[in-house]
């Protein structure tokens, strides 16, 4: 039977070997492959125009003015992510409100009232559910095509363009089903708003 003194060098050698293989070699290969073949995704799917970064395709941004498309409710807490000078250190933290909580119900009702007030031309239409509810992460950058089309009359009037032009912008910002069968068509709200502003 081998003693601890005999086993220890082999154990330490295994720790060093697997630290190098898993911590250096593997991560190095993955990083190189990602940067070579998927540089946009590997660097955060950032939307950059003329050297200025406007956000990420993967992170929602909050809009509530009449000139821009609205996304999902973003019940976020950014107050804790600041340094001693008040500088924000991180983007956001999703809320963990339960859909059954009174606070969440009040949030949804407040959103319903805002949507109706902002879109008087759609008074007779049902509000798409994703416009009045949070996503699981609280950071979803997408809404359904129905939710985007619901806002077309307001966006056309506010931006002094035709509804057809708004619909074209929505189409250009739509991500279609994966392989044409998996998932749903979704609209990236930030891309729509950057196109409305003439940035994209």
Image (cartoon, helix red, strand yellow):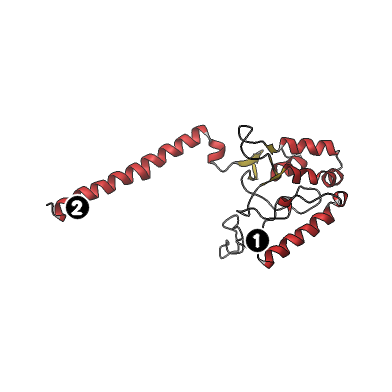
Helix, strand or loop at label 1? It is loop
At 70% from the left and 55% from the top, the residue drawn is: 133
Left or right for 177, reference 123: left
Of pointers 1 and 2, the one earlier in the residue sequence: 2
x then y, percent, for residue 157: 87, 45
Using the image, tell me which numbered label, if any, was put on residue 8: 2
At 60% from the left and 56% from the top, the residue drawn is: 92
Helix, strand or loop at label 2? It is helix
x then y, percent, for residue 194: 72, 42
- Marks 1 and 2, how far apart at CA: 54 Å
Callouts 1 and 2 close, C-beta under 8 Å:
no
Q: Decide: few, some or many residues near mark 1? Use Cα within 10 Å; few <14, some 14-19, many ≥20.
A: few
At 54% from the left and 41% from the top, the residue drawn is: 43
Quarter holding residue 185:
top right
Left or right for 60, reference 38: right
Q: Decide: few, some or many residues near mark 2? Use Cα within 10 Å; few <14, some 14-19, many ≥20.
A: few
Left or right for 5, reference 92: left
Quarter holding residue 156:
top right
Q: 191 or 153: which is nearer to us?
A: 153
Q: Which residue is mark 1?
A: 99
Single out the residue that lies furthest toward the left: 1
x then y, percent, for residue 32: 45, 36
């Amino acid at each position: 039977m081998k003693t601890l003194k005999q086993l220890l060098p082999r154990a330490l050698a295994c720790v060093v070997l697997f630290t190098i293989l898993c911590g250096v070699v593997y991560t190095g290969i993955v990083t190189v492959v990602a940067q070579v073949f998927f540089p946009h995704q590997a660097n955060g799917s950032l939307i950059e125009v003329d050297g200025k970064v406007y956000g990420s395709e993967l992170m929602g941004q909050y809009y509530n003015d009449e000139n821009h498309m609205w996304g999902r409710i973003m019940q976020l807490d950014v107050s804790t992510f600041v340094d001693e000078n008040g500088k924000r250190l991180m983007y956001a933290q999703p809320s963990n409100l339960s859909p059954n909580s009174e606070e969440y119900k009040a949030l949804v009702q407040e959103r319903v009232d805002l949507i109706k007030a902002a879109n008087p031309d759609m008074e007779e239409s049902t509000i798409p559910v994703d416009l009045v509810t949070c996503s699981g992460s609280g950071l979803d950058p997408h809404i359904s095509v129905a939710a985007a089309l619901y806002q077309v009359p307001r966006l056309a009037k506010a931006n002094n363009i035709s509804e057809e032009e708004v619909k074209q912008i929505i189409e250009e910002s739509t991500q279609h089903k994966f392989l044409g069968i998996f998932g749903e068509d979704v609209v990236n709200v930030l891309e729509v708003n950057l196109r409305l502003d003439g940035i994209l």
